[in-house]
Image (cartoon, grey):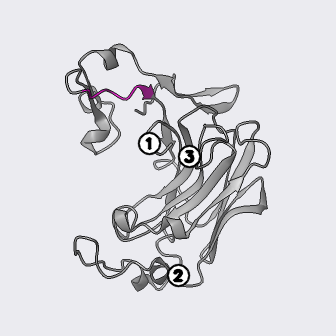
Amino acid sequence: MTTGDDENVFVKDGELWIKPSLQDEKLITKNSVIDLTKQGLCTSTQFSDCFAVTNTTNGTIVNPVKSARINSKKGASIQYGRIEVVAALPEGDWMWPAIWLLPVEDTYGPWPASGEIDMVESRGNNYTYKIGGNNMMSSALHWGPTPDADAWFRTNDKKDAFHTTFTKRYHKFGLEWSEKYLFTYIDSRLAQAIYVPFNKPLWPKGNFGSATGNGTRIVDPWSQTGRPSTPFDQEFYLILNVAVGSTNS
């Protein structure tokens, strides 16, 4: 559950902090309803994002952890250029920090057809976590005609912290993006996590086929632009968040 509370996102000694906290225990142990729309606090158009229930009979509970997610959508966006975020990632089991970008407009259709840029994703778990803990970070681009045809795995890679973790000190996490290429890096432009050249259209690289599993025809939403960087040729905005829990973190 994300909030705008000072408990979860605040500035301290000139630094921005995102700090998860535990939910009020009564909202978990007793029948409860959280309706952010009714409270005038919801910032999403999705009902499920703004409504949570604890039902002690069927075992449904309100998310036991609160955290924060902030973005620059109303203040700043970028179409080509460089972004650098200096940050120390959080340490602790089941934390999932991310520095990423989404398109300001869904020019080519809903996610992931209009793209997503993941500068940094990591985990708070230690090195024993099987898919990589706080000793690893990954970068990726998400792109595809439908959510079940997301070709992120074709533009994804990991970077090792080498005998330390990304929680021990501050690092400079960077993105450089042009009409010809996009790459992410750590501390130096020479230490790249992913490098994606835009020398050919992405659609053939995705190998998406002609139809989804249920027989729906797949349509190429990008090639008509004539730009190999499509869908990464629009304005994107920055997001910083620390997710907590779930079976993938």
Segment tinted magenta in the rendering: 59-65
Residue at 45%, 68% in the rendered image = 143
Q: As drawn, is 157 to the left or to the right of 247?
A: right
Q: Look at the magenta stretch and give its main secondary structure.
A: loop
The reply to whether discs 1 and 3 touch (Cβ–Cβ < 8 Å) is no
Which residue is disc 1 drawn over? 247
Q: Position of residue 224 (x, y in %)?
A: 40, 85
Going by the numbered disc 3, the residue's amino acid type is Ala
> As displayed, is residue 50 above or below residue 193?
above
Going by the numbered disc 1, the residue's amino acid type is Thr
Q: As drawn, is 206 to the left or to the right of 186?
A: left
Separation (CA) of disc 1 from disc 3: 17 Å
Which residue is disc 2 drawn over? 228
Based on the displayed image, in which of its 4 quarters is residue 17 positioned? top right
Going by the numbered disc 2, the residue's amino acid type is Pro
Does residue 63 show up magenta in the picture?
yes
> As displayed, is residue 116 above or below residue 151?
above
Q: Position of residue 36 (x, y in %)?
A: 29, 30
Which residue is disc 3 drawn over? 98
Residue at 44%, 42% in the rendered image = 247
Q: Secondary structure at mark 2?
A: loop
